[in-house]
Amino acid sequence: MTLPRFQYNEPASLAEACQMIRAFGEKAALLAGGTDLLVKMRNRERQPQEIVSLAELEEMTQISAAGGRHAIGACCTVSQIAASMEVKSTFPALASGAEHLGSPAVRNIGTIGGNIVTASPSADLPPALVAYGAEVRLKSEDQERFLPLEELFRGPGDTCIKKDEILADLRLESPPEVSGAGFFKLGNRRALQISIVNGACYFALNPGSGEIEKARVVLGAVAPTLVRAVSAESLLVGEKPGKGLFQEAGRAAALDCSPIDDLRGSAAYRRDMIQVLTCRTLQTALDEIRNH
Amino acid sequence: MKKKIQMSINRRTCEVEVETHWTLLDMLRNELGLLGTKRGCEKGDCGACTVLVNGKPVNACLYLAVRANGKEILTVEGLETDEGLHPVQKAFLKKGAVQCGFCTGGMLLTAVSLLDKNSSPTEEEVRSAISGNLCRCTGYQYIVDAVMFAAERKNQGVA
């Protein structure tokens, strides 16, 4: 079936795109990769009259770093993230999430911004981004604001981005020297699979004592939005990393989430997998520290 | 809304007036008659519509035609040259990697793109590269064999 008709607008800059969406209001939709929007339009779930295309805006497809602060443009494709030396060396769990998203052809079109604003509870990039403490920059015609990524999501398909705002880029700080992270994804096959569960773990050690100073355990596809496993995190902090501790944290994480039964898996299975995969991924994070 | 775009399709410069709501797949099949690019699931799940845009595989069903402006598009029709079939096409024939043929165009282009950037892939890398191209006939083994065979021949300098 063909797509519904629309007017196609190609702004020359992010600033012009902000003006356009304010002027078009409810009639507008932003196009980045289109892997989600075009499918919804084909199903007539969305019928925007004005498409504002960000896809070819070079200023939104940059990955840059200065003084330990990194910015990833919202229109960077998923394969660009997976292949970036900077991302692979500084944020390996994010690169891992990118490698596991969709299929190679989808990764060549889909963008990191699209993966976020779609706000699917099972999206593959947000867990690692939240684990690394990412912030988003939201730009409107006359303002910009920063927000921790985890505060962006309100429910499936729902974010607190205002109608006249565009997700411009993601901001991350280089993790401290003695830290590590990992990503996990469970699906029925290894490509084109919506996650049964996914997640990411991050922790940083006190270089003197070797105790965990900061921990983030982020779980996906087990609640209406991604969730922080707060009791697992508080259990980790102040302890020395090791297998026994990770197993305990896995059990705590399984109780921190609220999965449902659906066609991809039962709630009980999801909880069991969260326990096992959180434990394993904490080990991945520790391996990263040891291999440094 | 119509828009005139210019691009290279199978190494030839083309100017096409497209409707902005057309996908690249709509343009290739309906406007240009390039029927080798198949219309499958139309949501990026099957890979039957895979074409190369600037050398990278993309799902033509998820890519607006207007975005092709200024780009290089390669479809399965462009694989054959004056020298005959593309070495990867020859390998598919040799290894019996084609049954019904619906996935073949996308498979070939994905394989060509893989071998362009990695001339000696492992079997695992081949399987991962074609993971977005579904085949319901072959069970994939002969396709993987064909891509490995094409890589081997390329490295030996035989077409």
Image: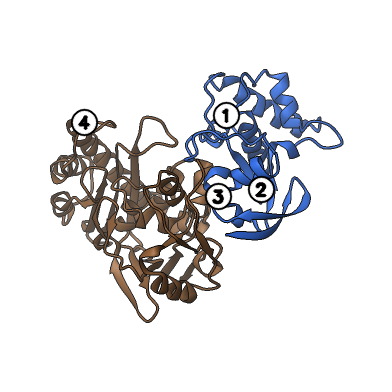
Which of label 1 and label 4 is nearer to you?
A: 4
The percent coordinates of residue A211 (x first, y second) are 21, 56
| Residue A59 vertical placement versus B31 (above, below) | below
What x and y, as percent, mark residue A157?
29, 52
Report if residue B144 is visible in the image: yes
Check the residue under mark 2 and report the chain it is in. Answer: B
Q: CA distance from mark 4 to mark 2?
A: 41 Å
Q: Residues within 10 Å of mark 2 (few under 14, many from 20)?
A: some
> Percent position (x, y) of residue B67?
59, 56
Q: Chain of mark 4?
A: A
Mark 3 or mark 1: which comes first in sequence? 3
- Label 1 – label 4 distance at C-alpha: 34 Å
Q: Identity of the amino acid at label 4?
A: Ser
Eyeballing the image, is B6 above or below B88?
A: below
The residue singled out by tag 2 in the image is B55
- The colour applied to the residues of chain A in this rendering is brown
Question: Which chain is represented by blue in the image?
Answer: B
Circles 2 and 3, Cβ within 8 Å, touching? The answer is no
